[in-house]
Amino acid sequence: MGTQSDIKLIDENGLRLDGRKPGDLRPLKIQAGVLERADGSALIEWGGNKIIAAVYGPREAYPKHNQDINKAIVKARYNMAAFSVDERKRPGPDRRSIEISKVLSEALESSIMVEQFPRAQIDVFIEVIQADAGTRIAGLTASSVAIADAGIPMRDFVTGCTAGKVDGKVVLDLSKEEDNFGQADLPIAVLPRNNRIVLMQMDGDLTLEEFDQATSMIMGAIPRINEIQRSALSSRIKVQDSGGE
Amino acid sequence: MPRDELGILSEIKRGYILRQLKEGKRGDGRSPDQFREAIITVDYVKRAAGSAMVQLGRTKVVAGVKVEAGEPFPDTPNQGVLTTNVELLPMAFPTFEAGPPNEGSIEVARVVDRGIRESKMIDLEALVIEPAAKVWIVFIDIDVIDFDGNLIDACTLAAVAALRSAVVPGSAEGKEDFKLPVRNIPVSVTMVKIGDNLVVDPDLEEEQISQGRITVTTTEDGRLRAMQKGDVGWFTMEEIKKAISTSANVGKALREKYFR
């Protein structure tokens, strides 16, 4: 995890720097259908994160030797804008974004009915406009809305959240300071109907008890996050009464 | 993991492997939570500061450590630097290609790196030459020369063995050579899900029919230091918890066996 620091991240009342309790989420907002050209899209604002996910496809996979005769391939590309972080990020994929793109593609593919689209490719472009910790999970949560917005058949949403350890305490949905100076980071994403885990990474230092605590916090938050995904999608669909006879 | 002509066989093989697993058996006769025999040859490359060749079943990797003086990262002026790189050499597998690292090798390298870094295996504070100006940079480079599954664990074993044998060339900076300061021993244990089974240390065939991969890296104290779920597929929380306890048990045995 990040470097050591003298900053106190949890005060004597058990509150965090931004005033949250250990199990509180940051403010979260999702809007579907934010782009004209893409087949599906979503904007997520989660804490200070601003991330757009755009979906193209299913379309013919290219180059052709990448085609799978049994199913569609899912290609997520996670990218951070140069201006999304304090110090300018050199544009283009680095090792971190390549790894993130891989695990996000695998998580999304686990939710999509890829067997309906042999030889096809589904592209998911995730652009981090402003980063504020938890970008991979926020990007993934938005991507799932964008895929639904594109009308691609899915088994379920993919819904994610992170937990971590800060000043020796387990907390939900790390902020930037907590991510930088905390002792552990645990992003998890599930198919929320049955809590099947499609993404999990961890780094830092956790005991088994802390892991259990962190995962039950995450599982407790998943239904709330999924509800926001669902309403983002349903508010995109307008029901119109055309009058008539 | 790569697909090749073996992929065509995998439906037939899959049925066979599944049937075998129902009786608790694997293709090579192992039990589900049995690691393959590892042969670790330390100091395999004399020109490196530390090195190890690991044969894990038929998977072979060579790890070499080089230590050079250089600049610290601005945000950690009082720490040495650790970098990990994995090369999937074209000689190791028909579909591995020469060229810049692809997402597969980057994932392996980063999971190995996280296990070593987060376990605080190396005392990076002891690798400062001049604070904020000059520190020791520890390069771990791993060549995969023969591929039969489970690169993450083979590479972690090789990196840890190489680091334990590494000597920092202090004489190049007017000081004395010293052993790389090593504190903890991280051990990673990787499992794949096949049907309802979690099998430890998958070989290539098992990886090709994986319905989800999970790696758990622990230290002596039983704490979790790094985890990674990979491949398309899913796990229940019960399966994750089972994977964690299997990793702790298997990891403990591996540590006793290879790193006493």
Image (cartoon, grey):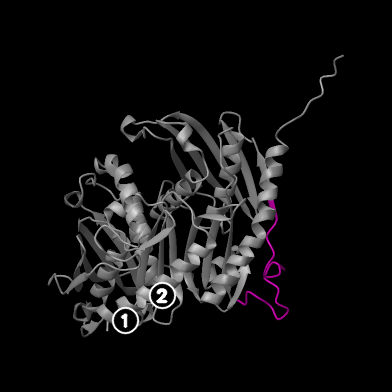
Which image quadrant for residue B63?
bottom left
Give how far across and how far down residue B24 sits, in percent. Answer: 35, 63
**Per the image, is A25 magenta?**
yes
Categorize mark 2 by other alpha carbons within 10 Å: few (<14), some (14-19), many (20+). many
Where is B4 relative to B154, above or below? Answer: above
**Per the image, is A9 magenta?**
yes
Q: Secondary structure at mark 1?
A: loop
Give how far across and how far down residue A79 sits, in percent. Answer: 48, 47
- Residue at 54% in and 54% down: A196
Q: Which mark is residue B182?
A: 1
Q: Amino acid at mark 1?
A: Val
Out of B197 and B53, give the one closest to the viewer. Answer: B197
- Residue that carries the numbered disc 2 in the rendered image: B248
- Identify the chain of the residue marked 2, using the numbered disc in the image: B
Which image quadrant for residue B80?
bottom left
Q: Is residue A151 left or right of residue B212?
A: right
**The magenta segment:** A7-28
In primary-sequence order, the first of circles 1 and 2 is 1
Which image quadrant for residue A131?
bottom right
Out of B69 and A98, give the one closest to the viewer. Answer: A98
Q: Is residue A5 left or right of residue B123?
A: right
Q: Which mark is residue A164?
A: none
User: What secondary structure predominates along the stretch shown in magenta?
Assistant: loop
Q: Amino acid at mark 2?
A: Ala
- Identify the chain of the residue marked 1, using the numbered disc in the image: B
Viewer can see residue B1: no
Viewer can see residue A75: yes
Can you name the residue that lies furthest to the right here? A245
